[in-house]
Amino acid sequence: MTAASQPIAKSAAVTRMQAAFEHHTGSSMPVRQQAFALFSHNGFPGTRDEQWKYTNLRRLEAREFGTGQPGTPYQPEILKTADALQMVFVDGHYRSELSNVPVIAGLQITTLSELQQSDQTRLSEILAIPGNHRCRFVALNTALTEDGVLIEAGPGTKLDCPLVLDFFWSDAQWSLMAHPRIVIRAGEHSKLTVIERFTGSGTTVHFNNGVTTAQLAEGAHLEHCRIQNENSSSFHIGLLYAELAEQATLLDHQINFGAALARMDIHVLLNGRDSRATLNGLQFATGTQHHDTHLQVEHCVPHTQSNEDYRGIADQRGRIVFNGKVHVHEKAIKTDAQQSSRNLLLSSTAEIDTKPELEIYNDDVKCAHGATVGQLDANALFYLRSRGLDESQARALLTHAFANHIIAQLPVAELREQLTDAGHVRFGAQLESAP
């Protein structure tokens, strides 16, 4: 056998994932086998991959992770949200006794663990989403997901209260991984709000690899939030894939506070005339945290609109990466696409890499993009200090004001308050005591 014909040796990390797949209860499903074969062939992405050149996964690949068990006797500290439907997952598994999901006309909620037991044909259809080939972590999620939720809003259904999906880790002392899958199907002229919260405490290193897909029918409206606040030792990989039909609207908020390394990929297809997407994001990296967001919006048909507003804050040796791409297809005339990346450096040792992109294939469009990286305004700091604030309070106040532009747009008042409190801690614990 020649060297060129020899199979590529698998890395130790891929071998460990293969062992986990072989022990998975659903490993006999063809869709899972195909997905893992794809992941196994490609392995983890490396810095030679253009989409990952700023994010090195060696720390993740060096770790060994177990899988959580259903029914772990752990009581998380749940942040209750008034008038909300709430689903709680611990170590990647749904906990019905901790959840509040009443029956609502027009809304069908099914966990993936239920489908694994009762309807594998439907589960296969759910897992075989478009785009698996675009992301190796989606393939890994497809192969290894054990639980998640299918959310179906029937035509005309308007949900007044948000659906909150809370993901926790137990107090286990060994490292665990989870691959939650969230599938949202919004029927014609339906309206709903879905909030994902990933919370981690302690110092145990965990790995969360979540995938959310959303299909919005004609006239549907979805407001989606993803709040990542894992502990500062863990790894968090996530993807949002959304398809919008005619006159559909997506309002998305991405908040990244936690994890040692966090990566979020967002891919939005505007497939219907007069569809629109508003995408907001906030990343805060301190210590040695590394936060990376890649966003791609496809304007596929005429008369579509997108607006992206992402902000990053880097302190100490934290690093933030943002890559936002707007792709306007050849026949997508009258496209309106606006993209903004604003970033704040709080330390000379922090780093921010931002790359907004426009790829346009017709002339009849209105598109703009911009990026800024700067420090706190010296005149504003001087003004606040002249009014009695010390330097740390003044810096915290200005930093919070910069971040609050994104936080203030979140849909639930309690959620805004919780993130404001978290911001006080992150941006300066003495902020509340300022005169």
Image (cartoon, helix red, strand yellow):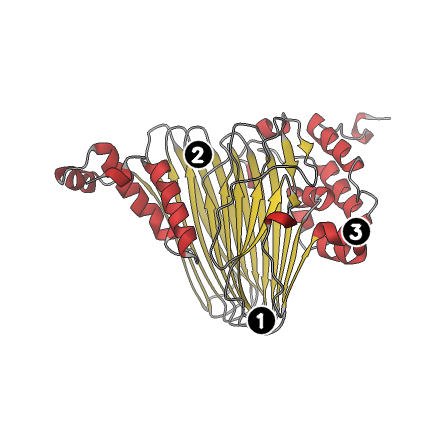
How much space separates mark 3 and mark 2, taking CA atoms?
Answer: 43 Å
Amino acid at circle 1: Thr
Q: In this rendering, is residue 311 above or below 155?
A: above
- The CA span between labels 1 and 2 is 42 Å
Secondary structure under the numbered disc 1 in the rendered image: loop
* Residue positioned 71% across, 27% down in the render: 11
Which of the 4 image quadrants contains residue 144? top right
Residue at numbered disc 1:
157
Which dot marks residue 319? 2
Q: Amino acid at mark 3?
A: Gln
- Can residue 51 be seen here? yes
Tag 3–tag 2 contact (CB < 8 Å): no
Q: Position of 257 compared to 75: left or right?
A: left
Quick one: quadrant of the N terminus? top right
Q: Residues within 10 Å of mark 3 (few under 14, many from 20)?
A: few
Residue beneath the point at 42% across and 32% down:
318
Q: CA distance from mark 1 to mark 3?
A: 28 Å
Q: Is residue 360 left or right of residue 138?
A: left
Q: Secondary structure at mark 2?
A: strand
Q: Nearer the viewer, mark 1 or mark 2?
A: 1
Residue 117: mark:
3
Measured as percent of width and height from the top left, residue 352 is found at 41, 37
